[in-house]
Image (cartoon, rainbow, N blue to C red):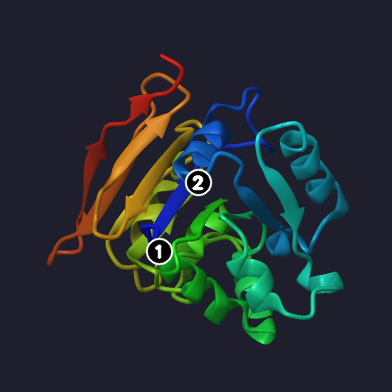
């Protein structure tokens, strides 16, 4: 049976959390008893320590972890490699640089195809922003709108909502705001799962954590709506 295209947006995971609840949730969401998980650390410049941390976190679990390094590329057929995975897990770092490198290697097109083929796409920070049309990104210093995402999800994402100054996260720091979108942050520790056909839901490892949607009205004012999340481990 064909798999349903799915994207999971991370607010934590192996690089930040003291437990494995969120990553366990993603492994389960793949629907595979032993999913193949590919880590894409492009946003960090393929930092060796980040890659080592991924393998340390996933090596003993019911999955088959691998990683893909565009900066030190050794895989010739990227399309076959990516489409053979059950999960693509994108790390955090510089969103703009990551998207540029992906496009040079054709990974943007391959990831779109993987999404349509039912490979579960997920990521933290830059790895969550990239799936949207746009995001609030600190790729160039202070957070500003970055309308350069892959566009698999409509709207925008602010991944560090609870740690960015309010004017920047809601107005775009004086620049043209991003499209209406979703907000998360480190203290929120949530995942949002989006499927096609649409079936949305949020989970969290921390009581009281939420996801927020922000819409900008005709008068330019921002309106926030809280989306509740189910607590994992209970």
Residue topped by disc 1:
172
Disc 1: CA contacts within 10 A as few (<14), some (14-19) or many (>=20): some
Question: Residue at position x 22%, y 57% from top?
Answer: 215
Residue 232 seen anywhere in this rendered image of the structure: yes
Say which quadrant the C terminus sits in.
top left
Give whichever of 144, 60 is nearer the camera. 60
From the top left corner, tell me how far across and down residue 36 is, in percent: 64, 51
Vertical side of 10 occupied by 178: above or below = below
- In this view, 134 is above or below 27: below
Where on the picture, by quarter, is residue 147?
Answer: bottom left
User: Can the viewer see residue 91 in this picture?
Assistant: no
Label 1 and label 2: CA atoms lie apart by 13 Å
Q: How many marks?
A: 2
Above or below, 224 against 158 in this view is above
**Of all residues shown, which one is farthest toward the top?**
234
Quarter occupied by residue 155 = bottom left
150 left or right of 220?
A: right
Question: Is 52 left or right of 144, judged from the image as shown?
Answer: right
Q: Which mark is residue 224?
A: none
Q: Is 35 placed left or right of 136 in the picture?
A: right
Q: In the rendered image, which quarter contains the N terminus? A: bottom left
Check the image and report above or below for 170 versus 204.
below
Residue at 25% across, 49% down: 199
- Which x, y percent locates residue 77? 73, 80
Q: Hey, which quadrant is residue 178 in on the image? A: bottom left
Q: Which residue is mark 2?
A: 160
Which residue: 55% across, 39% down? 33
Q: Percent from the top left, x then y, of residue 118?
A: 44, 62
**First-in-chain label (1 vs 2):** 2
Please tell me whether mark 1 sits on a helix, a strand or a loop: loop
């Amino acid at each position: 049976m064909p798999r349903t295209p799915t994207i999971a947006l991370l607010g934590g995971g192996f690089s930040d959390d003291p437990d494995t609840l969120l990553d366990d949730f993603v492994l389960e969401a793949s629907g595979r008893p032993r999913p193949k998980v590919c880590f894409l650390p492009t946003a960090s410049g393929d930092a060796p320590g980040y890659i080592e941390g991924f393998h340390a976190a996933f090596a003993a679990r019911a999955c088959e972890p691998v990683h893909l390094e565009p900066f030190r590329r050794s895989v010739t057929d990227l399309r076959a490699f990516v489409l053979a995975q059950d999960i693509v897990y994108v790390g955090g770092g510089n969103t703009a640089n990551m998207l540029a490198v992906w496009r040079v290697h054709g990974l943007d097109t391959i990831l779109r195809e993987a999404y349509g083929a039912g490979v579960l796409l997920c990521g933290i920070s830059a790895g969550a922003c990239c799936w949207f049309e746009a995001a609030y990104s600190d790729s160039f210093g202070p957070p500003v709108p970055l309308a350069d995402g892959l566009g698999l999800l409509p709207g925008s994402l602010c991944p560090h909502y609870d740690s960015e100054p309010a004017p920047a996260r809601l107005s775009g720091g004086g620049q043209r705001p991003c499209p209406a979108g979703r907000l998360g942050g480190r203290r929120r520790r949530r995942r949002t799962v989006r499927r096609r056909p649409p079936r949305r839901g949020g989970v969290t490892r921390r009581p009281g954590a939420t996801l927020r949607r922000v819409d900008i009205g005709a008068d330019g004012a921002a309106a926030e709506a809280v989306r509740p999340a189910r607590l994992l481990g209970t």
